[in-house]
Image: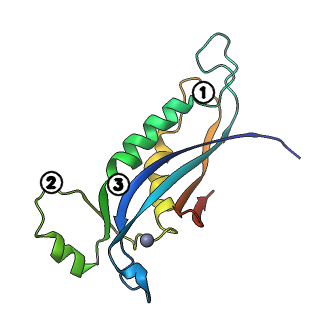
């Protein structure tokens, strides 16, 4: 058995959505306190005397990446499926600076981690050349409901 180091970090957002075809209440406009949590696997930086010695990557660097590429896009925003004609028509009434994020998928708990994974993955790296890999994105939609997109 090969042992490895895995670190996790999350960011939370207040985000609206709806699941247009849902048979029950999820078709109504509503929001969640989402938690987007990355799981990163790799080798610890061994370069002596550098800030990241003993780490995979600085947690604050992960935080900055999560903020820029997930939080700042979907926080206090409404995620809408680009085929959700009813909602798009309604949103036309809003001022253009209103924060709407159109996506090519139904914004379910299962689809959002795949989107967030792709947003974050290209930015997970350090300047020390240590092996570093985003292996999962977890999304908590409610305290009882999570979904994961995993390598
Ligand atoms: Zn929901």
* Residue 22 numbered mark, or none: none
Q: Quadrant of ligand 1?
A: bottom left
Q: Residue at x 46, y 55 (%)?
A: 116
* Count of marks, rendered view: 3
Residue count near mark 1 (Cα–Cα under 10 Å), binned few <14, some 14–19, many ≥20: few
Q: Going from the N terminus, do you reach mark 3 or mark 2 first?
A: 3
Q: Which mark is residue 97?
A: 2
Give the Cα separation between the discs numbered 1 and 2: 40 Å
> Which structural element holds mark 2?
loop
Q: Which residue is mark 1?
A: 129
Residue pictured at 18% horizontal, 57% vertical: 98
Residue that numbered label 3 is attached to: 74
Residue 123: image x %, image y %?
Answer: 47, 39
**Going from the N terminus, do you reach mark 3 or mark 1 first?**
3
Quadrant for residue 64, please give it.
top left
Answer with left or right where residue 9 lies relative to residue 45: left
Dot 1: what SS?
A: loop
Quadrant assignment, res 80? bottom left
Q: Are marks 1 and 2 in contact (CB under 8 Å)?
A: no
Q: Is residue 89 above or below residue 94?
A: below
At x 44% / y 87%, what residue is drawn? 24
In the image, taking residue 85 as reference, residue 62 lies left or right, namely right
Please, which residue is most extreme toward the bottom here? 23
Task: Looking at the image, tell me whether mark 1 or mark 2 is earlier in sequence order.
Answer: 2
């Amino acid at each position: 058995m090969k042992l490895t180091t895995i670190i996790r970090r999350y960011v939370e957002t207040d985000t609206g959505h709806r699941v247009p075809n849902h048979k029950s209440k999820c078709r109504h406009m509503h929001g969640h306190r989402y938690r987007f949590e990355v799981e990163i696997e790799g080798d610890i930086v061994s370069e002596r005397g550098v800030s990241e010695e003993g780490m995979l990557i600085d947690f604050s660097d992960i935080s900055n990446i999560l903020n820029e590429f997930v939080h700042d896009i979907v926080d206090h925003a409404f995620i809408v499926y680009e085929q959700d004609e009813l909602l798009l028509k309604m949103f036309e009434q809003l001022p253009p600076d209103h924060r709407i994020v159109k996506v090519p998928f139904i914004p379910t708990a299962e689809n959002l981690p795949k989107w967030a994974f792709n947003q974050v993955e290209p930015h997970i790296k350090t300047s020390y050349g240590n092996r570093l890999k985003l292996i999962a994105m977890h999304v908590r939609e409610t305290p009882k409901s999570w979904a994961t997109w995993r390598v």
